[in-house]
Image (spheres, rainbow, N blue to C red):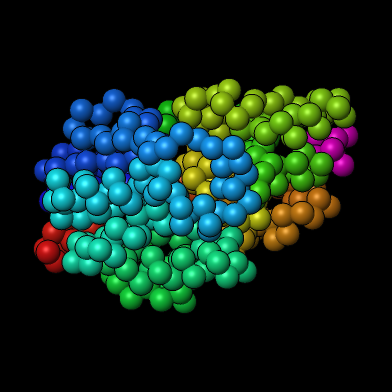
Amino acid sequence: MKILFVSIPALHTVRWIENLKEAGHDIYWFNVLGNEELLQKSYIKQITNWKYRKIPHFKGEHYLRKQYPNLYEKIQSNLEVTANEKLEQLIKEVKPDLVHSFEMHTGSYAILKTMLKFPHLKWLYSCWGSDFYKYENSETHIKKIKKVLNRIDYLHTDCLRDYNLAIKYGFKGEFSGVIPGGGGFMLKENQKHLLPIENRRIILVKGYQHHVGRGLQIIKAFEKVLTLIHNYDVIVFGAHLEVTNYIEKNKLPFKYFGRHDLEHNEILELMGKSLIYVGNSTSDGIPNTLLEAIIMGAFPIQSNPGNVTAEIITEGENGFLIEDPNDIDAISKLILKAIDSSKLLQNAFEINQNIAKERLDYAVNHQKIVALYQQIAKDL
C-alpha cells in the first residue's frame, strides 16, 4: 500500500513506523505542524516545510488564537496554508491507499475537513494518552471527537478503556486491538542493563507538572517521609520548573534532571538500576514510561485515571495504584509500603518480566502491527 502517516514529530511515531521498514509499503509522513523532520529515515518520504503565510501576521493574532480558538480556526485558511489544504494536495498527488493519523487533537482534528472530502479513502487513527478521557466534560471537544470517530475506518488504542470510550462516542469501524503506542520494546537490548533487585537503591520519579502531570505531589509525598527513606537515592527525571524550584527551595536531598537533560536510553538505564518507579497524572492512557519501568524491573507505583493502569498493574501483585493523584498522604503510604515489602518487590519483578515478554516485546507487537496493515490491504 501507499501509506500516508500524519502526526507531530514524535518518538512514538518513529518507533511505530519502524515496524513497517521491511513490509514493502510505500511510506510517506506528513508533519502536521510544518517544518521539523522525523529523524533521518531514508525509507520515509517526508513532507515538511510546507507551511507559509498568505498574509503577514497582524497585531492581536496570537491573542485571537489563544482566547478564541474556534473563531481563529474559521479564518485560519485566509491567513496561512492549513494542514487540511496541504493534505488535500498530497492526496491528489500521492493517491494514498491509507491515511494513518496519530493523536486526536493535533493530528486528526486538523485533517478532518479534507478526509470528509474523500469518504472512500481509508483512515486509521491511533489514540494517544488523553485523547478521550481528559475531555469527557468538554462539550466542544466531544463534538469534534465524535465527528472524527464517525469518519474513522480503523482504530488503534493502547488500552481497552479508550476503545470503550470510542464506542461510546460513536466509533463503528474496525478495532485493531490493544498495542503499545510506540509499538513495543527491544527487551534483549534493554534488559542487559538490569541490576538484581537486592542491588537497587534508587527510587525514580517522573517529574512532569503541567495540565495533567502531578510530579510535584510525588515530591511532597517523599518530603513527608524523608527520615524513612534516607537509605535510598531519589532521582527525578523530566522535571518541569515548578518541580525543580520546589526541590531547591526546600533543600530536598533529591537529584533531578530537567525535561531534556537525559536521552531516552539514559532514562532506561536509570530504570534498570531503580528499585521503585513513581508516575502520577490526572489523565493518560497506558504511560510509555510505566511500560518502560516494567520491562526494566522497577516496581511501579502509578496513577490510575479511568482505571486504565489497572489493565496492566494488579494492585498489590506487580505494582501499586495511585487512585487519587492529589492525595499526598496516600502516595507517601504506598512508597513506604513498597520499601518495606522486599518479597513483594521480588515477586513483582518476576511477574513484570513475564508481562514484558508476553505483551510488551517488540517482536510480539511487530507481528501485530504488520498484520494490521496486511488486513487493511485485503480490505481495499
Q: Is residue 376 left or right of residue 237?
A: left
| Residue 129 appears in the picture as rendered | no
Residue 109: give x, y in percent of width and height.
42, 57
What range of the chain is rendered magenta? 222-229
- Quadrant of residue 36 within the rendered picture: top left
Q: Is residue 335 left or right of residue 311?
A: right
Q: Quadrant of the C terminus?
A: bottom left
Q: Residue at x 23, y 67 (%)?
A: 119
Q: Between residues 151 and 215, which one lies in front from this camera angle?
A: 151
Against 261, residue 84 (above or below) is below
Within the magenta stretch, is there residue 219?
no
Q: How many marks?
A: 0
| Residue 209 appears in the picture as rendered | yes
Q: Between residues 204 and 9, which one lies in front from this camera angle?
A: 9
Residue 299: give x, y in percent of width and height.
60, 44
Residue 124: give x, y in percent of width and height.
29, 59
Against 11, residue 74 (above or below) is below
Q: Between residues 57 and 28, which one lies in front from this camera angle?
A: 57
Q: Residue at x 57, y 63 (%)?
A: 135
Q: Between residues 311 and 115, which one lies in front from this camera angle?
A: 115
Residue 58: give x, y in percent of width and height.
54, 37
Against 3, residue 191 (above or below) is above
Q: Is residue 206 left or right of residue 297?
A: right
Q: Residue at x 87, y 29 (%)?
A: 250
Q: Residue at x 14, y 45 (%)?
A: 93
The main secondary structure of the magenta stretch is: helix
